[in-house]
Amino acid sequence: MKILAIESSCDETAAAVTDERKIISSVVATQIEEHKLYGGVVPEIASRRHAEAIVAVVNEALNEADCKLNDIDAIAVTYAPGLIGSLLVGVNFAKGLSLSTGKPLIPVHHLRSHIAANYINNSELKPPFLCLVVSGGHSHIVEVKDYTDYKIVGHTHDDAAGECFDKSARAMGMPYPGGVHLDKVADQGDASEFKLPYPKIEGCPYDFSFSGLKTAVINTLHNAEQKGETVNKTDIAAALRSRVCDMLIDATMKASDDLGYKTIVISGGVSANSELRRRMTEECNKRGYALYYPELKYCGDNAAMVGVQAFYEFKAGNTAISDLNAFATMPIDKLLY
Ligand code: KG4
Ligand code: ZN
């Protein structure tokens, strides 16, 4: 089943042609260079750039796949969660394509597609498994009971892990998106040079709180600046990366031990983090658990993962009608369209 998938939830305009778990083409036009000027994503600029790029990106995905619209069986689109103005560009474009061609329209939840990024390179992976979903906007531990059946077991009470990395990195003078730069800088540092807090939520062992950690980093930098001292950025980057990994790994391992999962999956932009991958691998090896993570090119936002998840949504009967809307927030375990 050939699916034309579209993604525009944040600052990447992406389109792909997929066939079940196979990627025939995948095109991503990123806006990072422009948002860098402002230190983060400016929603109004993001939606304008999506509107400008979407026709060319979709055409390129079809051309790369050597396909015409007639060869496509269904249109899939990210409809939630994300920046509402950005999502609406993709949703309206996909609705137009679906209406004009008569092909089914498949709405895809952004976090479901991040999880599905793992189906691309791990052909043997199938639910049930436990998934840590960590991106710029989300940090969840999710039971993936089936391809379209989820239960959230842990979530952040404030910032997402990627947001904590990005905002701390910005305070250290790194360009947006800071997470990826911080990961490289941290490789040169000594994490033991800074003692950062380990925020925990009383009675919720699978939940996260990252905002206090971010504040601790920013305060350390400000206090030093006020005293005319310099902070070793590589060391504080290493300490932050290490603490975020402690929190993500401890909660995921506790959830897997308590709930009896022996297959662990990580997904979302932060699943590209080198320390998270390395330490998760060590922890899973120790316990004899299987660990899966996406190829680096499918960790961040892309439409290939949307097409793969759309295949399973279609099989489950989750297609939309022409009144499909976009939603800035939407729990992964609910279908409100
Ligand atoms: O999934 P994604 O592309 O967008 C959202 O859905 O939010 O995730 C982007 C996030 C950003 O916060 C970015 O800094 C982070 O993923 N990220 C990383 C790394 N690469 C991307 N964080 C830590 N280490 C990395 N190597
Ligand atoms: Zn994402």
Image (cartoon, grey):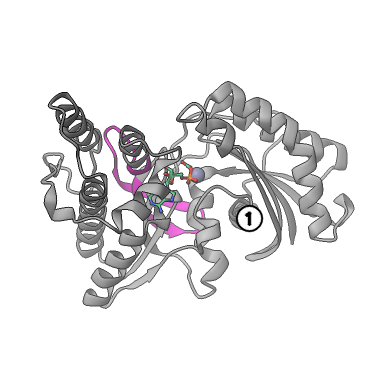
Location of residue 292 in the rendering, given as x and y in whole percent from the top left corner: 41, 68
Taking 79 as reference, is 98 left or right?
right
Residue 142 seen: no
Location of residue 327 in the rendering, given as x and y in whole percent from the top left corner: 54, 29
Taking 114 as reference, is 52 left or right?
right
Q: For the C terminus, give its image quadrant.
A: top right
Q: Which residues are magenta?
A: 140-162
Q: Compared to 37, does 33 lie above or below? A: below
Q: For the N terminus, give its image quadrant.
A: bottom right
Residue 177 seen: yes
Front residue of this view, candidates 311 and 247: 247
Q: Which residue is mark 1?
A: 304
Residue ID at (68%, 35%): 90
In which image quadrant can residue 322 be found?
top right
Q: How many marks?
A: 1
Taking 48 as reference, is 309 left or right?
left
Residue ID at (45%, 30%): 39
Q: Compared to 46, does 58 lie above or below? A: below
Q: Is 293 a magenta residue?
A: no
Location of residue 257 in the rendering, given as x and y in whole percent from the top left corner: 21, 64
Residue extending furthest top?
A: 44
Report helix, strand or loop for mark 1: helix
Residue extending furthest front?
A: 228
Q: Amino acid at mark 1?
A: Ala
